[in-house]
Amino acid sequence: MNQAVQSPIVQMSPAQRAALARRRTLWSAVEGYLYLVPTLLGLIVFVFWPIVESFKLSLNRIAPFGNRQIFVGLGNYTRLLTSSDYWNSVKVTLLFVLGTVPTGIILSVMLAILLAYPLGKMASVHRTLIFVPVVISSAVAGVLFRWLYHPVVGYINYWLVSLGLFESMGDAPNWLASTQWALVAVIIATTWRQLGFNVIIALAGVQNIDSSFYDAAKVDGANAWQRIRHVTLPLLSPTLFFLFIINVIYSFQAFGEIHILTAGGPGQATTTMVYSIFYDAFVGTPQRGIASAQAYMLALMVVFMSFVQFVGVNRRVHYQ
């Protein structure tokens, strides 16, 4: 009678089986790291290595002739902290963030609530029109708003005169040439371009709220505003928290609209920290050591602001 053929693993001793299991576990780990190699190489070449080189550059000053690096230690950082121009860029950046973030989030929530209601066949059209600015580059948006802000033929001043806010086009503000209005003009353009992304995220949050909460509120006699205040906004807080973090980071890094619309002017009315980095690194006499130091100061500020938001705002977030 023929004996049943046993598999090689069954024929192994316990020690051999344990050794085989260890080899398979080791190979699985190596195989996983091999899959990560392309991504790790990309991160090392394009992220980690530039970060290290930028920090080294921030500790040096570039000689104007010969492109020779002179080690100055923390001298670039000390120079920044005692520079009125640097503190002006910090002030402009904070004003820019305060102007874009709350306005963008409030408008996006309002539009998301409106779009959440049945709009018939036009619903997809409305959502597409609101999202269109996101796919437009900052350069195109900047050129568009330069035309809209034109003091003579621009539509914005034309609408303001038509509404009776100004007697004539000559009395309307010269948006991009006025130190009073230039930052406001950039804030409006940036908020418009970012609005579509915010609306899509807020709309997803609104539609994710269970209708049973609204039904319970209706039974308790809550009107539309009360349902929004006591149901929608509290349950939308995780989405609002996400939008708050993302918009603050984006506003700290905004560049395209500022460069196209005002180039940091008039004077330094719209010179944010990012634009100051660009100017010191590539415009006029390059000061790449100073620019790298400003980049690290900006990175520390963004990290600090994000930490404050997580500590302070996260307590008010309500998860379903």
Image: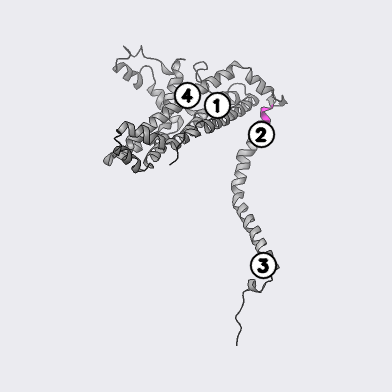
Q: Residues within 10 Å of mark 1 (few under 14, many from 20)?
A: many
| Between marks 4 and 3 in the image, the one whose residue lies nearer the viewer | 3
Mark 4 lies on residue: 98
Decide: is 205 above or below 99. below
Judge whether residue 298 is colored magenta. no
Q: Does residue 86 appear to the left or right of 101 in the view shown?
A: right
* Marked residue nearer the N-terminal end (4 or 2): 2
| 107 displayed left or right of 244 | left
* C-alpha span from label 1 to label 3: 60 Å
Q: Quadrant of the N terminus?
A: bottom right
Query: Distance of mark 2 from mark 1, alpha carbons?
Result: 19 Å
- Are dots 4 and 2 in contact, CB under 8 Å? no
Q: Measuring from the top left, give residue 265's x and y in whole percent.
A: 50, 18
Q: Quadrant of the C terminus?
A: top left
Going by the numbered disc 4, the residue's amino acid type is Leu
Residue 172: x percent and y percent? 36, 14
- Pick whichever of labels 1 and 4 is earlier in the sequence: 4
Q: Are marks 3 and 2 in contact (CB under 8 Å)?
A: no
Find residue 109 and name its label: none
Which residue is nearer to you in this view: 223 or 253? 223
Vertical placement of residue 6 versus 99, above or below: below
Read off the residue under disc 2.
53
Q: Amino acid at mark 3?
A: Arg
Which label was assigned to residue 17?
A: 3
Image position, residue 117 (x, y; %): 30, 38
Q: Residues within 10 Å of mark 4 (few under 14, many from 20)?
A: some
